[in-house]
């Protein structure tokens, strides 16, 4: 068998193990060890060194700290108060609940960076309100799915921390470009909701009835409830963006601040602290094993000539760098239909990032495009996680197919956003260039 077929066989074996239901982390590790043992025995030492290198990455400590911060804020009721506040202030607007859902989704992204929290929270609070006030159901479902997924792009995003660890791109710069792009994408969502209301006036009512609107006193009191959490997020992001501390230090500050907010609100209990730690441990363990498995897979893939093979193929594609970008975008989008975002980052970035840099693409632009594609994967069939999260809290009778159809306009908006980023990258990269040079 030709040695050039070994890298392709590795991917075939990986998908075979995934089809058997073996977790992605262990599938990656098993494939790496088997191919090293059979085709390249010295590669076993490389697997060991790759594993040790993964365990020694200090920056990745920010991941469990950010996750812990989000769990504490969610379990102490801060997230529910955020929903309540935004909806009270938007109650007099036409399409206000849908627009508020987008705003809440964006802020939730800044508070937690966890898509599941945003989707489920909006599904439990915003969706029933939209159905109650006669919003078009497809628009309501799509708004919740698209808005909740903003957490993948708006910092502090776990995906960005992991991308920075793998690619070497500044996490602070990734946060800055994610902030500008996330706000832009949220604005595109709001524009779409407004335009739909103009084209199809029956998509949602003119405004919530007066008797259902909050009074000014209620609105002002609700601001007081969410102010500490908003200040905490601004301080965490500001620490990173201004350069006062590393992402790991900022994450530690955020986790400690979340605990302090819970104490001040007299809602932090031993049970909340314990369950938050336990759930953080579960997620972090999955990330850690996936990191190790992907590092081992990537080391053997490269050692068997996979990186050289992919690089040569990319360099000989007709159409130049733009065609290479298109092919890689389709490849990442395809992986996103089947694999977890963490696995895609650990698996694809070491292969794609060096090639794109050789072709002259800005490393920060590559990271931004990667994040948008990962976000789009959350909405795409057959395993769009955002759709599956919402399906878990929708009324009986709502099918996955209905939710995928409802998410389609927001998926298209995300891909349009990627096109705009491709043709006008300077519009989105100005903030990280200003802050980080």
Image (cartoon, rainbow, N blue to C red):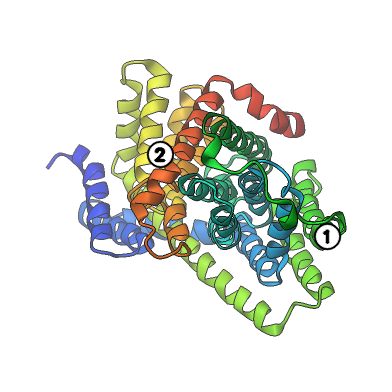
Q: Is residue 144 above or below residue 397?
A: above
Quarter holding the C terminus is: top right
At a point 32% along the width and 46% down the height, the residue shown is 301
Q: Nearer the viewer, mark 2 or mark 1?
A: 1
Q: How far apart are marks 2 and 1 (CA)?
A: 53 Å
Counting from the top left corner in percent of width and height, residue 372 is at 51, 38
Work out which quarter of the rendered image holds the N terminus and state it. top left
Q: What residue do we see at 39% from left, 32% from top?
A: 328
Q: Residue extending furthest bottom? A: 270
Q: Where is residue 348 in the image (x, y as percent from the top left)?
A: 41, 43
Vertical arrangement, residue 247 with respect to residue 324, above or below: below
The answer to whether any part of residue 297 appears in the image is no
Specify whether 117 is left or right of 396.
right
Q: Name the residue under label 1.
A: 218
Q: How crowded is mark 1: few (under 14 residues within 10 Å), some or many (20 or more)?
A: few
Task: Name the residue at 37% across, 50% down.
Answer: 402
Sequence-earlier tag: 2 or 1: 1
**Residue 318 placed where, x, y %?**
31, 16
Task: Report which residue position mark 2 lands on.
Answer: 351
Position in image of residue 54 (x %, y %):
50, 57
Q: What element carries label 2?
A: helix
Instruction: Give the left or right position of residue 408, taking residue 158 as reference.
Output: left
- Near-viewer residue (295 or 432): 432
> In the rendered view, does 172 fall on the left or right side of 402?
right
The image quadrant that residue 271 belongs to is bottom right
Q: In this view, does 271 lie above or below 200?
A: below
Most foreground residue, 43 or 145 = 145
């Amino acid at each position: 068998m030709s040695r050039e077929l070994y890298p392709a066989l590795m991917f075939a074996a990986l998908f075979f193990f995934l089809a058997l239901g073996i977790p992605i982390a262990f599938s990656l590790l098993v494939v790496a060890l088997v191919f090293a043992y059979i085709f390249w025995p010295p590669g076993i030492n490389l697997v060991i060194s790759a594993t040790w290198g993964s365990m020694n990455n200090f920056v990745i400590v920010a991941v469990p700290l950010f996750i812990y911060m989000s769990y504490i804020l969610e379990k102490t009721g801060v997230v529910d108060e955020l929903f309540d506040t935004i909806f009270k202030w938007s109650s007099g607007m036409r399409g206000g609940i849908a627009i508020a859902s987008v705003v809440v989704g964006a802020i939730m992204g800044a508070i937690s960076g966890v898509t599941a929290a945003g989707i489920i929270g909006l599904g439990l609070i915003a969706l029933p309100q939209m159905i109650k006030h006669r919003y078009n159901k497809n628009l309501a479902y799509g708004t919740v799915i698209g808005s909740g997924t903003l957490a993948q792009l708006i910092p502090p995003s776990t995906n960005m921390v992991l991308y920075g660890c793998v690619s070497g791109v500044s996490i602070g710069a990734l946060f800055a470009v994610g902030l500008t792009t996330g706000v832009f994408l949220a604005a595109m969502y709001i524009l779409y909701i407004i335009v739909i209301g103009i084209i199809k006036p029956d998509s949602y009512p003119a405004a919530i009835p007066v008797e259902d609107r909050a009074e000014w006193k209620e609105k002002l009191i609700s601001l007081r409830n969410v102010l500490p959490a908003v200040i905490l997020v601004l301080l965490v992001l500001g620490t990173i963006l201004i350069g006062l501390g590393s992402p790991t230090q900022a994450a530690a500050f955020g986790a400690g601040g979340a605990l302090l907010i819970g104490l001040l609100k007299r809602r932090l209990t031993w049970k909340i602290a314990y369950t938050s730690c336990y759930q953080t441990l579960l997620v972090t363990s999955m990330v850690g094993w996936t990191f190790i498995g992907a590092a081992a897979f990537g080391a053997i893939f490269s050692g068997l000539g996979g990186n050289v093979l992919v690089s040569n193929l990319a360099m000989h594609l007709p159409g130049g760098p733009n065609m290479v970008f298109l092919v890689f975008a389709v490849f990442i989008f395809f992986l996103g239909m089947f694999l977890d975002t963490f696995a895609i980052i650990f698996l694809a970035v070491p292969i794609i990032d060096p090639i794109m840099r050789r072709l002259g693409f800005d490393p920060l632009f590559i990271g931004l495009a990667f994040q948008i594609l990962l976000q789009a994967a959350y909405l795409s069939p057959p395993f769009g996680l955002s759709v599956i999260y919402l399906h878990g809290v929708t009324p009986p009778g709502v099918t996955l197919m209905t939710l995928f159809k409802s998410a389609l306009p927001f998926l298209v908006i995300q891909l349009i956003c990627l096109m705009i980023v491709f043709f006008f990258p300077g519009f989105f990269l100005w903030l990280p260039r200003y802050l980080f040079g």
